[in-house]
Amino acid sequence: MFISNLEFMTGKKVIKHLGLVQGSSVRAKHAGRDIMAGLKNLFGGELKGYTELLQESREEATNRMIEQAQATGANAILNVRFSTSSITAGAAEIYVYGTAVILDGLD
Amino acid sequence: MYELVVTLILISLGYFFGRRAERKHYKSIIAREKIMNSLPAMASRMPPQDGNYDQMLVSGSVVIANDYFKMFVAGLRNLFGGQMRSYETLLDRARREAVLRMKEKAKSLGAEMVFNVKYESSNISGQTKKKPPIIEVHAYGTALRKI
C-alpha cells in the first residue's frame, strides 16, 4: 500500500478514485506512564512515554485505514490527513483519513 | 502555610530544572538543524516535475510539558494580558523538534526533500486547570527519493 499526503504520485496516473477511507483509534494513558509523566510535569521537558503512546496509536489508526483501503481494492491512498482531539483528561483520539485510489503500474 | 511552602519548592524546582532542560534542548535543536539543512522541508504541494521520485509519508511527533515555574508565571501574565513568552518557547521547541524528527526519518529512508509539510498540535492534558499543559505536536509530509 502506497501512502502519501500529496494529491498525486509523480509519474503515475490515477485510474480510479474509490472514495474516502478512514481509521481512528482512542487510547488512554497507562497508569505507570501517568505517574512518571506527572513527575516530569514539574520540571518540564519531553514526556517520552506519551510520545510513544501517541505514535503507536497513530500507527494503529493508519493500519485500520489501510485495511479499509485494501477491502475496496485500492493500491494507494493519497492526500492523507491526520487529526487529534482530546476527549477527556487522559484519552486522545487519533483520526486518519485519505482518498483511496488505484494507480496505474503499481503492484 | 504548609501548602505555600510546597508550592514555593515546586516553583523553584521548576525554575532550575526547567531552565536547564530548555537551554539543553535549544542547543541540541540548533546543532541538529544545521545538519538537517541539507534536507529541505517545504510546505509546497508541487514536487519537481523533472525525474521520477518515490513518495513516502514521513512523520515526527513530540509530547512536551511546561514546567511548574513557567505555569506560575503564565498564570500571573494571565491577569495583566500581553505576550506569554513561556508558552511561546514551549511551542517553538516542540515544533522544531517534531520537524527534526520527521527529517531524520526521511533521511534514514534516503530521501532528498520533504514536501507538503503539515503541522498539527493538540493539548492532551485534558481540562485540568491545576496541572501544567501537555502539548503534542505532530509534523508530517511526503518524502521524495530519487529513483
Image: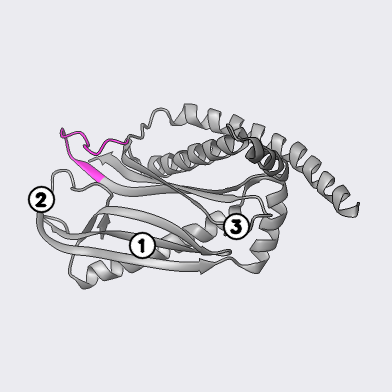
User: In the image, are marks 2 and 1 on the same chain?
Assistant: yes
What SS does tag 3 mark?
Answer: helix
Q: Position of residue B101 (x, y in %)?
A: 47, 43
In the rendering, at what x and y percent does residue B24 appear? Answer: 65, 34
Given residues A90 and B116, the one toward you in this image is A90
**Residue at image coords 28%, 49%:** A5
Which residue does the numbered mark 1 point to in the structure image?
A62
Residue type beneath disc 3:
Gly
Asked if residue A18 is among those painted magenta in the image, a careful observer would answer no
Dot 1 amino acid type: Thr
Please state if A83 lies on the left or on the right of A79 as rendered: right
Q: In front here: B36 or B147?
A: B36
Q: Earlier in the sequence, mark 3 or mark 1?
A: 3
Work out how far the residue at label 3 is from the one at label 2, CA to CA, in angstroms: 41 Å
Most frequent secondary structure within the magenta stretch? loop
Q: Is residue B45 magenta?
A: yes
Q: Nearer the viewer, residue B86 or B95?
A: B86
The part of the image, by quadrant, that contains residue B2 is: bottom right
Q: Chain of mark 2?
A: A
First of labels 2, 1 by sequence position:
2
Q: Dot 1: few (<14), some (14–19), or many (≥20) neighbours within 10 Å? A: many
Residue identified by numbered label 2: A13
